[in-house]
Image (spheres, grey):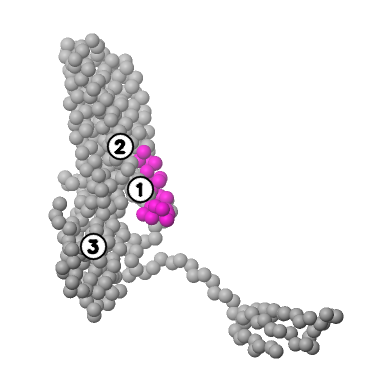
């Protein structure tokens, strides 16, 4: 008995006939016949980047730092080197002058060095690819680095404010006016140099009151404006606070140099300009907390995004609209789109994704398309969130 062999080059097993028996025992032998495939097996498809209408609007990210972050890395490295050199000079000058204000400025420079090193580490960490545990990658490490910079300044300033208060209560100290004046002058130059290095100039840089991060995006199919790096911005604001304090220390040193009896200007300048330095961190701290709390990006409004989605042909309603950021420049959106039964879901998805990217600069958008149902108007979970 022999079954018909399978076609197409597959494996066939048949029972050998009695005439093919061999040996004394005459037992049956099973024989497997393997035939070579007539055609080579197809190779696994190689991953390719999808076309314009696919859900990923941005090009496939390349390994390593982006040009913007590479520039931020160079700026932070240069500013960190300048900061280390002048910090050592201020420590020596403050010790020789017996000036708490100079030592205060040196301590702020030390905080600058620590924050810049943390920012450089966060930039390196943010280049790591996404994993199954960290599905968004490590982008938010940049925001955590900015938060560490602000917190370090608050801690150092708190200690120095306490020391300045102790000096105001006790007058048993002496100030070397000449050494203090020389050191304060150098400190002002150092902070000006660091501010120049960290200043994010460019063809699209905004000099308005809202800063580079909040340059408005115009309506229409155009690429979003490049925005400044969060870590560089935090370091720049940090240096501006130190520059204000250095100017105050310089003014106090001039007064003490010509009027030694007014040595109280040393702790007073420390007290006043430390408060100014704390106030300068408020905008950065506000933005960092907004990102960590997954609030709506400052440059994007809830209503404009909703109206843009509703303006897509075929969309009847939208709900579950969520807008948040991984960094100040990496915006994410997700929403449910309820469409007419006659609408093409693929066309609606492509058009909605295109508008979100071109008009608001969203780096990632996840849209769920579903058929519109009349009961959605009464659904509590489909209602828009109230105004904060």
Q: Which corner quadrant of the image does residue 24 belong to?
A: bottom right
Q: Is residue 248 or residue 30 the one in the foreground?
A: 30
CA separation in Å, label 2 and label 3: 35 Å
Badge 3 density bin: few <14, some 14–19, many ≥20, Cα 10 Å? some
Tell whether label 1 touches label 3 (CB within 8 Å). Answer: no
Front label number (2 vs 1): 2
Name, please, the residue furthest toward the left.
387
Q: Is residue 198 visible?
A: no
* Residue at (23% x, 62% y) in the render: 320
- For residue 130, above or below residue 12: above
Name, please, the residue furthest toward the right.
24
Q: Check residue 120 for magenta coloring.
A: yes
Q: Which residues are magenta?
A: 118-137
Residue 249 image position (x, y, % from top left): 22, 23
Q: Is residue 49 visible?
A: yes
* Residue at (25% x, 63% y) in the render: 335
125 left or right, relative to 364: right
Residue 320, disc:
3
Q: Which mark is first along the chain, 1 or 3? A: 1
Q: Check residue 315 for magenta coloring.
A: no
Badge 1 density bin: few <14, some 14–19, many ≥20, Cα 10 Å? many
* Residue at (28% x, 30% y) in the render: 155
- For residue 385, above or below residue 189: below
- For residue 267, above or below residue 14: above
Front label number (3 vs 1): 3
Residue that badge 2 annotates? 149
Badge 2 density bin: few <14, some 14–19, many ≥20, Cα 10 Å? many
Q: Is residue 354 or residue 239 the one in the foreground?
A: 354
Front label number (2 vs 3): 3
Residue that badge 1 annotates? 69
Q: Which mark is first along the chain, 1 or 2? A: 1
* Residue at (34% x, 64% y) in the render: 56
């Amino acid at each position: 008995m022999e079954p018909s062999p399978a076609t197409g080059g597959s494996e066939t097993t048949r029972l050998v006939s009695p005439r093919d028996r061999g040996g004394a025992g005459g037992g049956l032998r099973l024989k497997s016949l393997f035939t070579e495939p007539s055609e080579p097996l197809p190779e696994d498809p190689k991953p390719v980047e999808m076309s314009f209408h696919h859900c990923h609007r941005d090009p496939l990210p390349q390994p390593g730092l982006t040009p913007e972050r590479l520039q931020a890395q160079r700026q932070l490295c240069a500013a960190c080197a300048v900061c280390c050199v002048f910090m050592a000079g201020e420590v020596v000058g403050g010790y020789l002058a017996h000036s708490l204000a100079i030592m205060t400025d040196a301590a702020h420079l030390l905080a600058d060095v620590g924050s810049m090193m943390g920012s450089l580490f966060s930039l390196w960490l943010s280049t790591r690819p996404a994993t199954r545990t960290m599905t968004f990658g490590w982008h938010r490490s940049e925001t955590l680095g900015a938060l560490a910079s602000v917190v370090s300044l608050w801690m150092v300033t708190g200690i120095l404010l306490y020391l300045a208060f102790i000096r105001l209560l006790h007058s048993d100290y002496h100030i070397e006016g000449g050494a203090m004046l020389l050191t304060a002058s150098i400190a002002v130059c150092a902070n000006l140099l660091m501010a120049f290095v960290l200043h994010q100039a460019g063809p699209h840089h905004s000099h308005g009151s809202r800063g580079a991060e909040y340059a408005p995006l115009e309506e229409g199919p155009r690429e979003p404006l490049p925005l400044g790096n969060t870590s560089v911005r935090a370091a720049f604001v940090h240096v501006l606070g130190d520059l204000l304090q250095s100017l105050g220390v310089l003014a106090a040193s001039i007064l003490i140099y010509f009027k030694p009896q007014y040595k109280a200007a040393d702790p007073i300048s420390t007290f006043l300009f430390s408060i100014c330095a704390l106030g300068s961190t408020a905008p950065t701290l506000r933005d960092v907390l907004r990102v960590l709390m997954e609030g709506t990006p400052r440059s994007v409004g809830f209503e404009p995004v909703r109206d843009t989605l509703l303006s897509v042909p075929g969309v009847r309603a939208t709900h579950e609209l969520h807008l948040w950021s991984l960094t100040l420049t990496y915006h994410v959106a997700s929403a449910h789109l309820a469409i007419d039964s006659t609408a093409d879901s693929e066309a609606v998805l492509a058009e909605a994704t295109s508008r979100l990217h071109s008009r608001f600069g969203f780096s990632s958008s996840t849209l769920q398309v579903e058929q519109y149902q009349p009961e959605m108007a009464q659904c509590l979970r489909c209602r828009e969130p109230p105004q904060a």
